[in-house]
Amino acid sequence: MSSPSLILSRDQKQVLDAGFFAAFEKTPERYFSAPGRTEIGGNHTDHQRGRVLAAAVNLDTRAAVRVNGTDTVRILSKGYPLCTVSLNTLVPQENEINTTPALVRGVCARFAELGCKVEGFDAYCESTVLPGSGLSSSAAFEVLIGTIVNHLFFGGRVSQPEIAQIGQYAENVFFGKPCGLMDQTASAVGNLVTIDFFDKDHPVIEPVDFDFSACGHALCIIDSQASHADLTDEYAAIPGELKQICAYFGKEVLTQISEADFFAAIPALRKICPDRAVLRAIHFYQENARVPQQVEALRRGDFAAFLELVKQSGYSSYMYLQNVIPAGYVEHQDVAVSLALCEHYLRGKGAYRVHGGGFAGTVQAFVPFELLDSFRAGIDAVLGQGACHVLSIRPQGGVEMEVEA
């Protein structure tokens, strides 16, 4: 599954060239891009090898790149310090957990394991996928680095879904975050896709041909302005608690356990697992069943049914998955406030839900065009100017860009 071409305009090239020259005193040779992503359906289903509906969006991380003839990768992202990684050491480093060098080292290590002779390169990056935006800036960065290495040193032989798996490996093993595979896959592959992760080595990826704007609704992402800092334990607790459920059955993930068997075991599970784990498993079974229903609704053009399913997903995440308010938080409940604002300004129309990992970050809303101006003004008045982003779906995943003639 390859991405269509993406053109780098002369103005965009000039900006990247200037940044690259300021950093490395040379001119770049090639240019790459990887998009952010939005999760349309399947909230926290991917780490249980379930189903998702996701899309690449028209915000991306771009890089100007040049092979440097050394055994060192140097990456300067605008606004951040220079990231330097020696290719002589391709094992996880304790002092790099939760850092950018860990992601770079992890991607390069996995390519090396696949037989790729990774060499040093310089890259200057600029991004419109802001950290903490809920559009997965980390996945876009991982896919970007994977795409660069794949094209520079491996002849492009690794597929886009495999690049996603390499990004996940880097995040799990080197960065130290137990993420699923949805973010990387949506960024790597591009467009609107539904993904079934049951076979973890060969996820089934199918395109979904649908134009949201043709249904009179804008796709909006609302930045709650909450910080992800110190929330890693909250995110990790979700797959961690579901592992307790799975351990009772001697299984790895919930997709290996039938819903009927799970519900029959709830009396026994409540004696050995927290009730929150049981509720989170209930969310998984409901949400995993919703994704194919959403896909079918879009394919038959029943947008009203799709919106109803989006609302149900949001209710389930709030009530059962419980990824809206971090445990014990009283003073700051930013995502909950954002959801309340969406309900108020949508006036019973459209749909809204917590988006992505939850706890901090973003809310997703499908807003009728006639309400978009008042909706955006109301959201921005509370959360800050520019908190409401109107997005479109990008056909391309991770790609080498063609320079405008």
Image: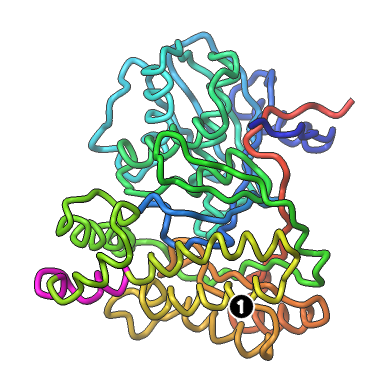
User: Is any atom of residue 126 visible in this view?
Assistant: no
Q: Residues within 10 Å of mark 1 (few under 14, many from 20)?
A: some
User: Is any atom of residue 189 visible in this view?
Assistant: yes
Name the quadrant containing residue 367: bottom right
Judging depth in this view, the residue of 181 and 85 nearest the camera is 181
Return the residue at label 1.
Answer: 308
Rendered location of residue 240, percent (x, y): 24, 58
Note whether 247 is above or below 118 in the view shown.
Answer: below
Please say whether residue 255 is one of the residues in the magenta stretch. no
Judging depth in this view, the residue of 220 and 201 nearest the camera is 201
Total labels: the figure holds: 1
Rendered location of residue 137, percent (x, y): 53, 49
Note whether 25 is above or below 204 in the view shown.
Answer: above
Taking the spot 22% from the left edge, 50% from the top edge, the residue there is 251
Image quarter in which the N terminus is found: top right
User: Overall secondary structure of the magenta stretch?
Assistant: helix
Note whether 374 is above or below 385 in the view shown.
Answer: below
Note whether 174 is above or below 405 in the view shown.
Answer: below
The three-letter amino acid code for the residue at tag 1 is: Glu
Image quarter in which the C terminus is found: top right
Name the quadrant containing residue 212: bottom right
Return the residue found at the far left.
271
Rendered location of residue 120, percent (x, y): 48, 16
Taking the spot 59% from the left edge, 61% from the top edge, the residue there is 40
Taking the spot 66% from the left edge, 28% from the top edge, the residue there is 64
SS of the residue under disc 1? helix
Taking the spot 44% from the left edge, 46% from the top edge, the residue there is 197
Magenta-colored span: 269-281
Rendered location of residue 122, percent (x, y): 55, 22
Left/right of residue 153 with respect to residue 252 in the rendered view:
right
